[in-house]
Amino acid sequence: MKTVINAVKYETWCRVLTLLMRLVVGGLFIFSGFTKAVDPWGGYYKVGDYLTAMGMEHLSGTALLLAVALAALEFMLGVAIAVGAYRRSAPVLGLVLMAVLTPVTVWIAVTGAVGDCGCFGDALHLSGWATVGKNVLLILGLVWLLLFNKTLRGVYGPAVQWMVMAASFALVMAVAYYGYFTQPLIDYRPYPVGTRLVATDGADASQEASEDDFILVYSKDGQEREFTIDSLPDEEDGWEFVTRYHARRPSGKVIMQGAGGGNAIAIMDEEGNDITLDVLADSRRTVLLLLPDLPQVGVVNSFAINELNDAALVAEADVIGLTPATPQQVEQWQDLSMASYPIHYMDDSELKMIARGNPAVVYVEDGVIKWKRTLGSLENVQQPAELSAMGDDWDAGAIITRLMTAYLVAMLALLAINRTHLLVRYFYYKRHKNKK
């Protein structure tokens, strides 16, 4: 084996393939880590699902830390592989990581214990076996790099490689910070700003999402599969409907209604009646207070919520609480917080998809989402005249552009500092050679 490696490692095709492996394997790790970092709440929920499925609920307090740590590790590992930093240790670390994650993905594919692996957050959904196949290909690519990675120089020299990793870590932490404390900088979920939450007769039909825009998830024998509207399974064969999600992220101000033009969400009262249209009537200004984990909201948040409620009332807007909690938990919260706003019920997974945070605030006007934030990121809630403009100070596109620009400038600066002497040496020797 060693003889074969020595015989081919400096062949042109081998070096080209090694470069390709760096870019493909590194790119996949970068994409995986970045999409997780963008949405730390989603990673927190997904890790919690894993821990629950494994009977390790006692470790749920570490779910957020594990989610952010995995995002940072994957992103930094991907950058290291792509630029050829730590040419030996990076593939080894990648193989160790895959040795941990691949058995988990096989278990998911076999048992269906967790609906989606969450490998790429909400940016890309893969079936269980597709995830296993992806991991196998990654392992093969990492093995190749383990054998041949040292045949190619890295973009950066050893002296600054740790700085490259530090800059990558800083980018991931900044992205995760905004995603956790405000909202994800890139919204991969099916309810971005501009989404219509209720069907209206006046909606532009050309903007409505058709049934073809949805992926429907069905379950059978503990396994979940995805179907389009044209390939639905026969429920008489044991298939049960689980959920649906939008197949593509709407761009710009796109109106997204439910399949068939119905409501995109379902708000229920205590008796289980659908009251979505009553809550989000046309021409009504509504502040949706999302409480996905009501027992963890805390009394401290109740003061800010009550201030928001007072400001909304002055601005002639309604505040509506939405939660998957039990009626008993809702009653306890109302007594504890002295809440004067109504609280209704929504499916847990759907609630978490609309906006991130516990609590989160979503401003809806004429049935359309205008802005959404975590409660803690809102300022000046006492000024009702500015209720509709509270989200104006949050420009996710500008923030992500600034972060990426700063990161790329730092990477280019490190490259210039680290490699300029090679260019100087090259031109110096070339000049003297020509004189001779």
Image: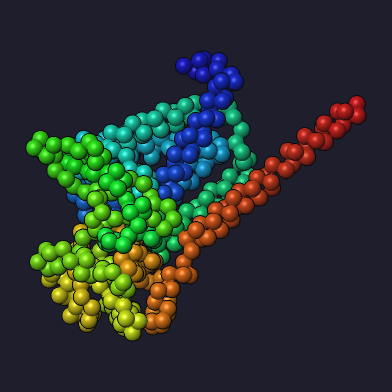
Q: Quadrant of the C terminus?
A: top right
Could you say which is closer to the camera, residue 57 or residue 44? Answer: 44
Q: Is residue 417 above or below residue 301?
A: above
In this rendering, the answer to whether 381 lies above or below 189 is below
Horizontal and vertical percent for residue 84?
A: 56, 37
Residue 239 position within the rendered picture, expressed as x and y whole percent measured from the top left: 13, 39
Q: Position of residue 266 (x, y in %)?
A: 21, 60
Q: Give residue 306's quadrant in the image.
A: bottom left
Horizontal side of residue 134 vs 34, given as left or right: left
- Residue 89: tell me if it is visible: no
Q: Is residue 155 left or right of residue 395?
A: right
Q: How is the image coloured?
A: rainbow
Residue drawn where x is 33% and y is 54% of the image: 205
Q: Is residue 385 left or right of residue 428?
A: left
126 or 25: nearer the viewer:
126
The image quadrant that residue 102 belongs to is: top left
The residue depicted at 43 percent of the width and 47 percent of the height is 33
Q: Is residue 264 left or right of residue 174?
A: left
Foreground pick, 164 / 110: 110
The answer to whether 331 is drawn above or below residue 71 in the figure is: below
Residue 112 lies, in percent from the top left, at 20, 40
* Residue positioned 47% across, 60% down in the render: 396
In the displayed orientation, state which residue is furthest to the right.
Answer: 435
Residue in the image at 28% along x and 69% along y: 282
Say if residue 255 shows up in the picture: yes
- Quarter holding residue 341: bottom left
Front residue (pair 168, 204): 204
